[in-house]
Amino acid sequence: MTLLPRNKNLTEIPPPKPQGNQLFPVFLKLENLHTVLVGGGNVGLEKLTAMLQNSPGAAITVISKTFLPQIEALAANTPKLTIIKKAFADTDLDGADLAMAATDDAELNRYIRQSAHDRKLLVNVADKPELCDFYLGSIVQKGDLKIGISTNGKSPTVAKRLKEVLNEALPAELDTTLQQMSEIRNSLSGDFAYKVQELNRVTAVLIGGEKPPSNNNLKLVVWGTFVAFLVITITALWSKEPGFQAFVANINPLFYYFLGAGFIFAMIDGAIGMSYGVTSTTFSLSMGIPPASASMGVHLSEIMSNGIAGWMHYRMGNVNWKLFKLLLVPGIIGAVTGAYLLSSLEHYSQYTKPLVSLYTLILGFVILKKAIDLNRKRTSGKIKNISLLGLGGGFIDAVGGGGWGSIVLSTLIAGGRHPRFSLGTVKLSRFFIALTSSLTFITMLNGKHWEAVAGLVIGSALASPIAARISNKISAKAIMFSVSVIVILISLRSIINFVLKLI
């Protein structure tokens, strides 16, 4: 084959220049690498803080003639962070895996870069994108979810602003979603194609796809149980309770206070998934309602909401049936016992009220701690005596007017149980706890304070559909802080008033 001579007169057309950001994003396991950072000033502190915030176990050596006090403080509290007070030498990069130059000396930064390249090391040079082999982008983190933002070195300020926007827009609950998906993935059996198909089916609802099939029979059972219970309760009260008949004939203005309170407390519960019982009970006690009647109002109003929530979790496969059985029977026994005991002491409410206020005070601090630890992972040992937890949780819930979620759910999650299955199991069991507690209270009490009970029931029912829609648009941490402070202050006020009366 004869090759034609190249025509040198032809104009060569250069290949088109790539457009946009050509960086290849990676996430490094810095705990397995040795990073050498040169510079102990403000820029060095910024680089060091960014690395430690994302990789607290990173092995880092910082070299500089002088150090900011903040860097020295970090070194004192970070085992794998070493600072060396000296001028940089070429041999300081021996044994390093990554290098960073963060000094205010341009010539020294170039020397560090050349020393790193001589050793085939990747290097980052502060404020000099053209000298960098990699950039430190802005990071958005929600638990195990981590998003890196890069502007290709054009504008770190824009990257920081985008980080702020995404931090506000992405809910902290995204980490829970990741844990749930991981649990689903690990539970699937079959070949790779089947697993992909199942994960696509589960996540289709997130992008407007086909929703998982509903269980209409179970839905009918839940709604039928609630409606039948409501009809039986109203009929029994109407025919046997003069107090209830009088309430219907002449509505007490107190009803409207509890109507508004029930609405607000249900909204709070919808936003943070807890505290309806403790807030309702605290408010009821502050309005002069005896503990037994306050607890009855809470449990009556929780029947429908927990029935629907329990059905939804059952439909989504979020119920651990072994855990459910261990909780249910002891929980019912504890709830009935607590409701019976509290109802029997209704005439001694002046003595039981401060005890319940002490309980709500403790729950206030529990909620406060949950707010502080909202994004922290639990590391305590897994609880084994589930039946005892259910018995105690049901009893305290009935006596104190709430706390099944705060006590049982928090204990299960803190003990290493999976949050999704714990929540679904606790919500479904809560329906039966509220049902049996309510029946016990109705049987034992003489029909007093129905204006408060009815207000809570109707108010919470009206708020339920609204709370579901706004729950992701409210800062759960801010609400938990606010609720805990309010509960603590009102409980303290009730206890102090009781002590002053004794004095």
Image (spheres, rainbow, N blue to C red):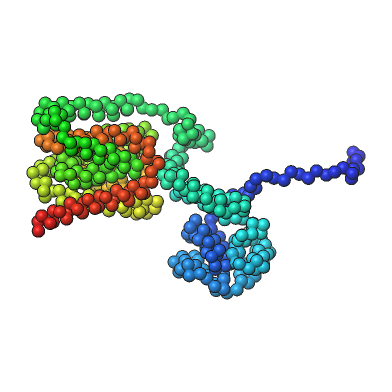
Residue 129 image position (x, y, % from top left): 64, 57
- Left or right, residue 183 beside residue 455: right
Which quadrant of the figure has residue 245? top left
Which residue appears farthest toward the front when viewing the image? Answer: 253
Q: Can residue 172 be seen in this view?
A: yes
Q: Is residue 264 above or below residue 221?
A: below
**Residue at horizontal 45%, vertical 37%?**
188
Q: Is residue 399 visible?
A: no
**Residue at horizontal 11%, vertical 46%?**
349
Residue 293 image position (x, y, % from top left): 16, 40
Q: Is residue 5 above or below residue 157?
A: above
Quadrant housing the N terminus: top right
Q: Is residue 118 above or below residue 193?
A: below
**Residue at horizontal 57%, vertical 67%?**
39
Residue 396 image position (x, y, % from top left): 20, 46
Quadrant housing the C terminus: bottom left
- Left or right, residue 343 beside residue 412: left
**Residue at horizontal 17%, vertical 51%?**
494
